[in-house]
Amino acid sequence: MANATVTPTRPYGLGVLPKLAANPPEFFLETLKERGNLVEINLGGSKLLLVHHPDYVKHVMTDHAKHYGKGSMWVAIRKMVGNGLLGSEGEIWLRQRRLMQPAFHRQKLAGFANSMTATIAEMLDQWATLAKADKSVDVTRAMADLTMQIIVRTMFGSGLELNEMQEIGDAFATALKLMNTRMWTSFLPISIPLPGDRAFKEAIEKVDRFVYRLIAERRHNPNASDDLLTMLLDIRDEETGEGMSDQQVRDEVFTVFLAGHETTATVMAWVWYLLEKYPEVERKLHAELDTVLAGKLPALATLPRLKYTKMVIEETMRYYPPSWMIPRSTEIDDVIGGLPVKKGTTVLISPYVVHRHPDFWENPDQFDPERFDPDKVVPRSAYIPFGSGPRLCIGNSFATMEMQLILAMTAQAFRLRLLPGIKIKPTTMPTLRPNKALQMTLETRTKPVSSATWQIATETGEYAVVPSDTTTGERG
Ligand code: HEM
């Protein structure tokens, strides 16, 4: 590991704001190259501290986590998720984290695989029709719809009509846009109106109507499903015996929607983009899928054998981490790597920079899944797509399993190619995502298993394993 001692360099001034605004992740990376592992930006009244070295990241996110709150940049997020897990702090956070953890236990996750696979099969059904008609697909949108459908089904036991799902997805996208603006203008009081406030409010109201409907239906029919929503409604305070109010349940449901669909969708969008750019990676992936799956659907038990599939996902999250920046604020006067840090300073950790730190990654700008070969040593402390410490993403195993299934099933069935003339670069909205819709053509590799056939397989009690005769899903 590189030496973590640092000589703090002179701070940047307000003059860097245009560069920062133009391309925040690249600007952050430049600061590492120009000024090193701890970089200060003076913004007149307030200061930003960029923390680039994994040892200092550990200091903030793990070793001294209790002294680092979420800070003013999270005020905007709280406008969406209230006191839900993502934005809450202290006792409320600890209580909610303990309550929600069981919904993400390994055993629970095993049960979700079935529902994920069925949802992916439905999407591939539609894609097969589009492929036959030589129609292209907006893959960014398709991945957002798919991950939204998966989260709604697995966490809240409900199905959604496509138009309803797209409406909710659009409402989220609108709200996220304003949240991004608010994050970067967090030095302004929240009471100062900004363009887009009204659209934000309307978007939140739209999602709220849906969430409160889900809650009301479940309160009316409490035994409908053994999922996160039921768990949230069953929770009782040990002392008072009181359950969570609709508002509290709403905040958690909203949190899981927000944290659990856009991130995963973004990684998957990048995967399709990168596979086309790196044909050798695509070839290896196809070889693994064709050998391990041999025309069948992936089962939970197959996932450990889909090693390269997982490596592609891990490398995509290194290359383009959706949560490219994680803000914190010190609640005490502290010292990081010899640099005194005043109480109230906003500390920014960027997985994008840490993942391209040249002291830890060889040829960091090269997309190379081989880095994550289980036989090689990965610099784990310099790999933080899901954050680290006590606030580590609660959904990380859920997301990894979901992405492995999406990639395996989709790449087995189709090769995706971007329409000519579309130039893509990353943008922050606030996740690190492609700046344009990935409009892609579908080249059929093998016939996807139809979701009707899939139903037959699951109803007969099969667990995501399709028997090897043609009536139950064997691919021709
Ligand atoms: C590729 C997919 C995902 C990525 C990259 C990701 C990334 C992250 C990161 C970086 C954090 C830490 C934020 C911080 O420290 O301030 C986080 C927290 C969180 N994530 Fe994820 N996430 C993903 C998927 C999911 C999924 C699928 C769910 C739920 C089903 C989820 C739910 C949450 C929640 C509830 C938190 C807050 C945890 C806490 O503060 O205790 N995430 N995520």
Image (cartoon, rainbow, N blue to C red):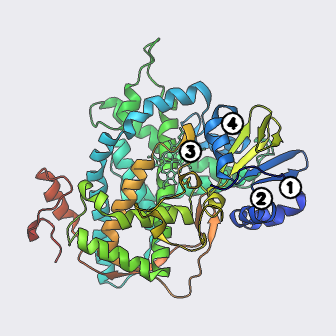
The single residue placed furthest to the top in the displayed view is 239
Q: Is residue 41 above or below residue 305?
A: above
Look at label 1 and name its amino acid.
Answer: Thr
Given residues 423 and 192, the one toward you in this image is: 423
Which of the 4 image quarters holds residue 373? bottom left
Q: Secondary structure at mark 2?
A: loop
- The local secondary structure at tag 4 comes to strand
Residue sitting at 33 percent across and 45 percent down?
109
The part of the image, by quadrant, that contains residue 13 is bottom right
Residue drawn at x 58%, y 33% as measured from the top left: 83
Q: Position of residue 259 (x, y in %)?
A: 51, 48
What is the CA distance from the residue labelled 2 to the residue labelled 4? 22 Å
Q: Is residue 79 visible?
A: no
The image quarter containing residue 59 is top right
Counting residues from the start of the chain, the first of labels 1 and 2 encountered is: 1
Residue 54: x, y in percent? 64, 51
Looking at the image, which is closer to me, 328 or 225? 328
Q: Indicate the quadrant containing the N terminus: top left, top right, bottom left or bottom right.
A: bottom right
Disc assigned to residue 68:
4
